[in-house]
Image (spheres, coloured by chain):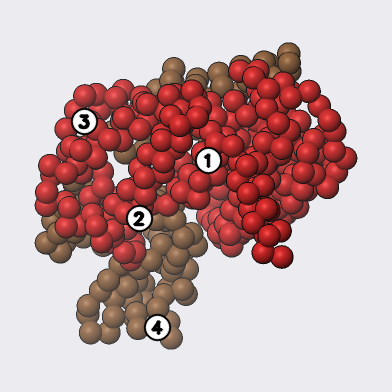
Chain colours: A brown, B red
Amino acid sequence: MIKGTIVSIVLLAATLSALHRDPLDDGFPLSTYPMFASKRTTKLSIAYALGVRADGTSSPLPSEVTGTGEVLQAAVVYEDAINHGGKALAALCTSIAARAPDDVVTIRIVVGIHDAVALLVDDQRGTEHVRWQCPVKP
Amino acid sequence: MFAPAPAERLAALRIAIGAYALVYVMVRGPELISIAQLHRGSFDAIGVTRILSSPLAPWLAIAIGVATVVLLVLFTLGIAYRYVAPACALALLWTLTYRNAWGQPFHTENLVVLHVIALACAPAADAWTLGTPRAGDPTEYGWAIKLLAALTAATYVIAGVAKLRLAGAAWLDGEQLRNQIAVDNARKVLFGAMPSRLAVPLLGHPGWFTGFSIATLVVELGAPIALFGGRIARIWALTAWLFHLGVLALMNIVFPYPLVGVAFLPLLEPEKIIRRGMRRRARSV
């Protein structure tokens, strides 16, 4: 009974301690659950990779080309490479090229600025600034 | 809190939660292997992994993942529970925290880790075990079941409070939720994934999101009523399950623990579900 009381108080207090932390000070497994809670606009600035085909058309590459299936973790991989500059971008670009689909001839790592609603509803892409590009070797 | 409960109820929770965690870690296995080999610059220590100044060698991260799977098998079967359960809780805590330490904590794994830690502190292998069964006092089991239920409710309350603390009452007008859903789906498109088929047409009708926002906060902040048990708990669990179904439909985000229902089992009487299944099976045989 005493053990149950102690375990219950400790685990519940630890979990609820999130209420006394800054909501953006997330943790695991003691999370503040800040997902989708912050105020935000529909403007989205994010780094990702485009696969350019021989005819000049391009489309975004899946997160798996970075080595993770999770979109948010892939975004961190791109951001990290951009923050570290040319050498890191070159290495990332080369590793993406090795995993790119067969019809892709060039990899472009870009930072895109989009309006999320315009992109989804009207298929309107915003601006994309190329940070690095490399060829896909056959 | 200390209302008596049958040992089978706690055992059923051990089996369901342990089996869920086992399948989850196995399904995530290939991704855990990929993550172990990510560029070290993407490593952003969180929780218990803060003891590391740099990522583990990939072979070691993978070995801990494999050990977690073995421990989860023993945990679920109730073998050598007194020793296995704490080791299993620690291993799961480490493995999933390590997965979350690569720039983006996910919120789909917190509750199962908390539940396994709670079970590891309780006599959850006194019944329905391949170890040695024990006839304990029914008051020994009630607190653990209540704790599991309280942890489920607490996570929802924290999520609701975070929305009010970060966005205030403005979160209720629906615009914030609409923007979040739009950005999340746009991000998917930019990473070659499919956006939600339901979200795209709904984005043109902002009024819907006011209703979704209010419903979200009602489910999250109303979670403690589930602790009254009985029909109220079942109704809240169903409502929360529908909420996660809505998240899946609008954002293609899967919260597997609540969606398969395991997160809500401490609010129900899972041993009766198992017994009913066993009776049905015996009749068919």
Do marks 3 and 4 share a chain?
no
Q: Nearer the viewer, mark 2 or mark 4?
A: 2
- Residue at left offset 11%, top offset 61%: A122
Q: Are marks 1 and 2 on the same chain?
A: yes
* Label whose residue precedes the other's in the sequence (3 or 1): 3
Q: CA distance from mark 2 to mark 4?
A: 27 Å
Residue A96 appears at what percent x and percent y?
A: 43, 69
Marks 2/4 in contact by CB < 8 Å: the verdict is no
Image quadrant assignment for residue B211: top left
* Callout 3: SS: helix
Return the residue at label 3: B172
What mark, if any, has residue B252 been given in the picture? 2
Mark 4 — residue? A102
At label 4, the amino acid type is Asp
| Residue appearing at x 50%, y 20% in the figure | A17
Q: Nearer the viewer, residue A138 or A2?
A: A2
Three-letter code, disc 1: Ala
Q: Which residue is mark 1?
A: B263
Tag 2: amino acid? Asn
Instruction: Identify the subunit bearing mark 3.
Output: B
- Taking B85 as reference, is A85 left or right? left
Which label lies toward us, 3 or 1? 1
Taking the view exactly as shown, the residue that stands out farthest to the right is B132
